[in-house]
Every structure is written in structure tokens, then in C-alpha cells.
Amino acid sequence: MPKRGHVSVRFPSGRIKKMMQQDEEVGRIAKATPVLVSKALEMLIEALVDKACKVTNAKGSSTLNVKYLQEAVAGGGTVDF
């Protein structure tokens, strides 16, 4: 599957901070923490899409769908950042 270009996905750090603050055990959150969590989410999604693309190619399909994404997630392995 040819790459069409790298699309940068940004997760809003304000929303991430609000989600983190919903946990009662979380106290103060450093300013850089939501930004780092956002980057980790980007990396996770990129790894999942790459695995799903490999599954899609292995099946001989040219369309990535939910089934192939589920197979990529079930295929397991750990994701190292």
C-alpha cells in the first residue's frame, strides 16, 4: 500500500488534561504531561494503522476496514515507544 503522505494528528491537550483530572487519585498535572500523552496516542494509532495495513495487504485487499484493524489488535504484541 503506497504511502500518500504523513498526516499529523493532534489530540487536544486541554481535553486530555480534563480526562486525567477526572481520576480522583490524580493531583496536579505538569504542563508537559498532556502534550506527552498526546504524542503517545499518535504513536499508538500509527502503530495500529501500520499493523492493520500489513493485515490488509496479506489478505490481498486494497481497502482497510474494521475487520482488519481488529485482527491487527488481536495479533497482539507489545507496542514500545
Image (cartoon, rainbow, N blue to C red):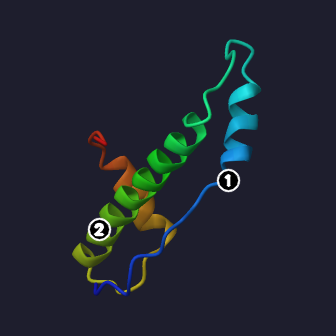
Q: Is residue 78 left or right of residue 17?
A: left
Q: What kind of residue is marked 2? A: Val
Q: What kind of residue is marked 1? A: Pro
Closer to us: 29 or 60: 29
Q: Position of residue 30 (x, y in %)?
A: 60, 28
Q: Is residue 4 left or right of residue 17?
A: left
- Helix, strand or loop at label 2? It is helix
Q: Quadrant of the N terminus?
A: bottom left
Q: Residues within 10 Å of mark 1 (few under 14, many from 20)?
A: few
Q: Is residue 75 left or right of residue 15?
A: left
Lower position in the chain sequence, tag 2 or tag 1:
1
Q: Position of residue 42 (x, y in %)?
A: 47, 55
Q: For residue 21, which numbered disc appears in the image?
A: none
Residue that sits furthest to the left in the current view: 58
Please name the residue shown 55% across and 37% down the image.
32
- Helix, strand or loop at label 1? It is loop
- Residue marked by disc 1: 12
Closer to us: 30 or 9: 30
Q: For residue 55, which numbered disc appears in the image?
A: 2
Q: Quadrant of the C terminus?
A: top left
Q: Quadrant of residue 40?
A: top left
Please name the residue shown 32% across and 84% down the image.
3
Closer to us: 22 or 48: 22
Q: Residues within 10 Å of mark 2 (few under 14, many from 20)?
A: many
Relative vertical location of residue 30 with respect to residue 75 in this rendering, above or below: above
Relative vertical location of residue 22 with respect to residue 32 in this rendering, above or below: above
Residue that sits furthest to the top in the current view: 25
How many numbered discs, if any?
2
Closer to us: 68 or 40: 40
